[in-house]
Amino acid sequence: MSCKKFLGAASAALTIVIAFTLVLAPAAGAASKYKVLRAFNGSDGSTPYAGLIFDAAGNLYGTTVGGGVDINGNVFKLTPNADGSWAENVLHTFNGSDGAEPFAGLVFDAAGNLYGTTGSGGADNFGTVFKLTPNADGRWTESVLYSFNNRDGRGPYAELIFDAAGNLYGTTAFGGNLTSSVCIGYGCGVVFKLTPNTDGSWTERVLHTFNGSDGAEPIAGLIFDTAGNLYGMTDDGGDLSACGGYGCGVVFKLTPNADGRWTESVLHSFNNRDGANPYAGLIFDAVGNLYGTTQGGAYGNGTVFKLTPKTDGSWTESVLHSFSIDLGVPLAALIFDGAGNLYGTASSGGPADGGAAFKLSPNQDGSWAYSLLHVFQGDPALAPYSGLVFGSAGTLYGSTAYCSSSSGCAGVIYQITP
């Protein structure tokens, strides 16, 4: 399996300096207005890998993988000012023992507390689930809800989700069955549930342990359907004859049983021709179709795909867009607008090879039209690993993990007005 592939990239994300030649053609999609809201400087955060969320007052929240006092990453808040600028406030800096490298985004509960994961750190250095509680003085208090021990998961790189009862669900890319003949020594990953106890502690339970043939390395997060089933993707596994013997990844479903256990079923196994190695999560449309991205495919680049359920319980995959010409590598989930258009990012590729924000619009014949919203040219932003989120009036917000080597910054938060 490709354990070293992801862990190597995660470690390198804190130290790589990306050099780009900035003598480039003007960005495509010139009608879209692009603005940098915040450029990180290292001390206030570095490498914002994950997506953003809004609160009801219009403030943005996110995480940085590195930076801060102990270089273990931060949780931050961006507040809009009357003059159009944004003020950053670091809510928490990780110190290793309480977590490190928060690759995932955040989620609010109904009381305004924030929850997230760190890819490493904690009691055994295998990652944590944490909570941030706002105080009356404006500061936030962090508490570690759970530290993984490898047997019950390792490397929670994805955002969490709540169910209606207040339980948390997530994935770890590694850990679980450490004796697996496929994921030898490090495990193929797990799906887990955290249940709050009356004393304030949380109990973890592994809902599914991957074995390779049913998926491996679930880097992406989960979503629920209306019946309470969970859906997700794994970066590797599935058909182990594909993608160099590691498998190209799967789309899976977890169905709860009356006895409390969960049954996994593979909805689709990628074969490289139709996509490979999905990093990001899935989304539903209004009629129950699933949409997602893969970072690989037949042309060595990524795809945007759709899965349609059939009456017999199986699902049909169709590729909506292949980045054969656009040279894109999408690592983030998609979002819909009210008109049924899809929006996403490609972390690299595009006309300037620094990544791009794109839109896919459905045509009457069933095809989808691809258009560029913004091309990242190192001005200063590069490599949008995270997806997009809508603000007011259709404005889009996102982050890039890096900057051009000449800019001196360590990733940005940006705004695009289509």
Image: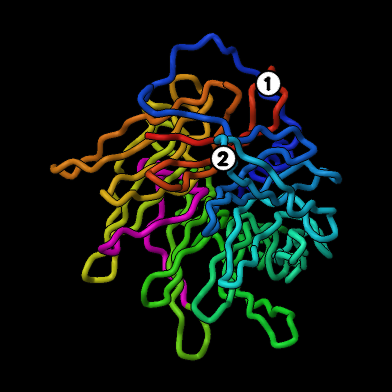
Q: Quadrant of the C terminus?
A: top left
Magenta residues, start to end = 263-288
Q: Amino acid at mark 2?
A: Ala
Residue 130 visible in the displayed image: no
Tell me the number on the disc at residue 265. none
Query: Residue, x 37% and y 77% (percent of image)?
Result: 227
Query: Residue, x 79% and y 51% (percent of image)?
Result: 93
Q: Quadrant of residue 265?
A: bottom left
Which is more toward the observer, 91 or 303?
Answer: 91
Q: CA distance from mark 2 to mark 1?
A: 27 Å
Q: Which residue is mark 1?
A: 407
Question: Total marks drawn?
Answer: 2
- In the rendering, at what x and y percent does residue 249 appear? 48, 52
- Residue 111 in percent (x, y) is at 60, 72
Colour scheme of the rendered structure? rainbow
Residue 249 appears in the picture as rendered: yes
Earlier along the polypeptide chain: callout 2 or callout 1? 2
Residue under the point 85% across and 44% down: 69
User: Which residue is depicted at the point 52% across and 30% down?
Assistant: 35
Q: Is residue 256 magenta?
A: no
Circle 2 is placed at which residue position? 82
Q: In the orientation shown, which residue stands out farthest toward the bottom?
A: 259
In this picture, residue 93 sits left or right of residue 153 = right
